[in-house]
Amino acid sequence: MSGRIRRCNADNTYTLSLNCPLCGRQTSTAHPARFSVQDRFGKYRRAAKEETK
């Protein structure tokens, strides 16, 4: 069990376990990535996001 809250993308259930207690699928972290003013790879991430639109 991890110490951070996690979320199931399938049914939006919040839990602390790595698998959803309702559907059994794998959960992902519910927290955003850390913010840094000196983000070295920000322009590449924004370019990749624009590419998928």
Image: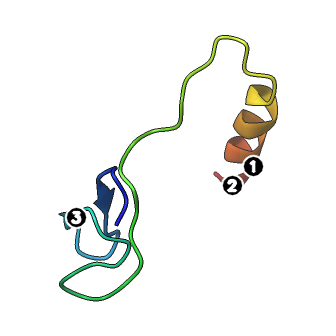
Are there few (<14), some (14-19), or many (20+) residues within 10 Å of tag 1? few
Q: Is residue 20 above or below residue 46?
A: below
- Judging from the image, the colouring scheme is rainbow
Q: Which mark is residue 15?
A: 3
Image vertical order of residue 27 relative to residue 53, above or below: below
Q: 30 or 45: nearer the eye?
A: 30
Disc 2 and disc 3 in contact, CB within 8 angstroms: no
Q: Residue at x 31, y 88 (%)?
A: 24
The nearer-to-camera label among 2 and 3 is: 3
Identify residue for label 2.
Answer: 52
Mark 3 neighbour density, 10 Å: few (under 14) some (14–19) many (20 or more):
many
Label at residue 19: none
User: Marks 3 and 1, how far apart in space?
Assistant: 33 Å
Give the residue type that dot 3 points to: Thr
| Quadrant location, the N terminus | bottom left
Using the numbered discs, state the Cα–Cα distance from disc 2 to disc 3 in whole angstroms: 30 Å
Element marked by disc 2 = helix
Within-10-Å neighbours for mark 2: few <14, some 14–19, many 20+:
few
Q: Nearer the viewer, residue 28 or 45?
A: 28
Circle 1 residue = 51
Q: List x then y, in percent, for residue 26.
A: 42, 78
Q: Residue furthest top?
A: 37
Dot 1 and dot 2 residues touching (CB under 8 Å): yes
Percent coordinates x, y for residue 46 in the rendering:
71, 35
Is 39 left or right of 2, judged from the image as shown? right
